Amino acid sequence: MFHFLTNVTKIKYVRHNRNEPNKMNQQEFLHIVLPFKDKLYRLAKRYLISTDSAEDATQEILLKLWINKLKLKNYNNVEAFAMTMTKNYCLDRLKAKSSQNLKLVHSNYKDNTVALEKQIETNDSVSIIEKLLNELPEKQRIIMQLRDIEQYTFEEIGKILELKPTTIRVNLSRARKTIREKLLKQHNYGIR
Amino acid sequence: MESVNIEKLLDKYFEGETSIAEETTLKLYFAKQNVPEHLMQYKAMFAYFAQNKTEVSKKPIQVNPKKQTWYGKSMAIAAVFLLLVAIGIKYTYSNDKLSDAELKEAQIAYVETQKVFKLISENLNKGNNAVAYLNEYESTKNKIFK
């Protein structure tokens, strides 16, 4: 019986020692996560449009990272990993939403009010860009977000979205040209 | 920078061929006040990029520090297991150590208890027989009052 007991304490001791270097407290975790937390939020918002959904998504991703915090040190690029997680999470959310029969969902409902607000402030040209950007196809929208706003390189975007650099370049060019066309239309309309 | 150069950069930009540094140049150029009239429509676009980058999540980070870790769980399991083992050991040892005198006493107690139970059941049966008469009364009453 005593032999058995000493065995148990030995195992406990070894495990404790093994865990020590991998342990991460909340401070360390925040130190890793804070630099790109808002990037996750902005990416989520570009996918889900609604601010509330984006906040929830960010929270969810951070929680997932916290739960797997011991594995974080094995990834050499935590930021890209977190961005990919955000992408997958948002795609899941969008899929779940589109599979619902009820079409009067939160985002649809909210979208209209935003459009109404925007009609009131039409002369705010910056918010027009936001509208134009959000009208783009999903892939182009996200690539433009990552490139023009977050200023990632093509390699990094490729890692996050799991796409080839050439695909990214083509989509980015298309997105920028679409924005330009619509802007020109609006611009000329303003002149005439 | 010359607006001619900027136009060249813009062409490259719309083909998706500019580098990060060149895009930064464009952003800085359009952030300035004196942008020529024919390039004015792009100003809002670059302004939006800069503005959106400052948008931040307002919710504070909430990670649940009470979340049980694998280590904590394994410790809890080990503790419960040890407790069960201790109880088990205690019971097996105490059962084996009944002395002969104790065994005899237990036997006697068993026999005595059986006697008492028998006595009770006999008396109970007598009572049951008496109650049977009441059933007789019930059936007769049913015959008369239908």
Image (cartoon, helix red, strand yellow):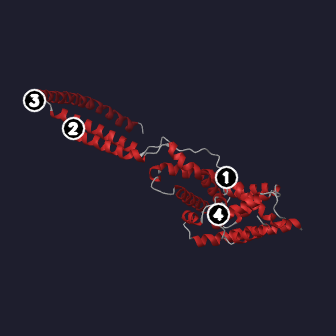
Amino acid found under the numbered disc labelled 3: Asp
**In the image, residue A63 lies at what x, y percent?**
53, 49
User: Disc 3: which chain?
Assistant: B
Circle 3 residue: B100
Side of A115 relative to B109 (left or right): right
User: Disc 4: which chain?
Assistant: B
Is A35 placed above or below A152 here? above
Asked if the residue under mark 3 is in contact with the one under mark 4, i.e. CB atoms within 8 Å, the reply is: no
Q: Earlier in the sequence, mark 1 or mark 2?
A: 2
Side of B110 relative to A67 (left or right): left
User: Disc 1: which chain?
Assistant: A
Residue at image x 16%, y 30%?
Answer: B110
Instruction: For marks 1 and 2, give the CA distance.
Output: 61 Å
Amino acid found under the numbered disc labelled 4: Ile
Circle 2 residue: A2
Is A167 placed above or below A102 here? below
